[in-house]
Image (cartoon, grey):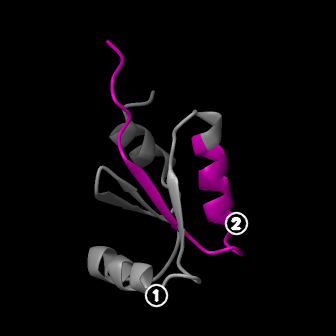
Amino acid sequence: MEQKQPKVIIFTTPTCPWCRAAKQYFMQKKVKFTEVDVTKDQRAVKDLIRLTGQTGVPVILINNRPVVGFDRTKIDQLLGLK
């Protein structure tokens, strides 16, 4: 039986190089994700601050567990990737 993929949400801005790197990494690993552009969504900014205490991007939520920045080791760990 195939394991269900964790829910992945990535908070980004259009100019963030680490956001692009993270999205590219997910596509490479065939991980589905939802992107939230914080420049277009003020509520998302409030969510970010509530979750992480900061406004820096990318913030990646994997099953509601926040990863601040493109921390590949932590991302792989939470996704169960090797």
Task: Indicate which disc residue 34 carries.
Answer: none
Q: Which residue is outermost to the top? A: 1
Residue 11 is inside the magenta segment:
yes
Q: What residue did someone put label 2 on?
A: 17
Q: Which residues are magenta?
A: 1-26
Q: Residue at point 29% right, 56% down?
A: 65
- Residues packed near mark 2 inside 10 Å, few (<14), some (14 to 19) or many (20 plus): few
Residue 36 in percent (x, y) is at 52, 68
Q: CA distance from mark 2 to mark 1?
A: 21 Å
Asked which quadrant contains residue 1, the reply is top left
Task: Say if 57 sits above or below 64 in the image.
Answer: below
Question: In the rendered structure, are the residues bearing label 2 and label 1 in contact, judged by CB atoms less than 8 Å apart?
Answer: no
Considering the numbered disc 2 on the image, is that residue within a helix, a strand or a loop? helix
Task: Say if 33 sits above or below 3 in the image.
Answer: below
Task: Say if 49 sits above or below 62 in the image.
Answer: below
Residue 50 in percent (x, y) is at 28, 81
**74 or 65, which lies in front?**
65
Query: Which residue type does callout 2 highlight?
Result: Pro
Query: Which residue type does callout 1 highlight?
Result: Gln
Q: What residue did someone put label 1 on?
A: 42
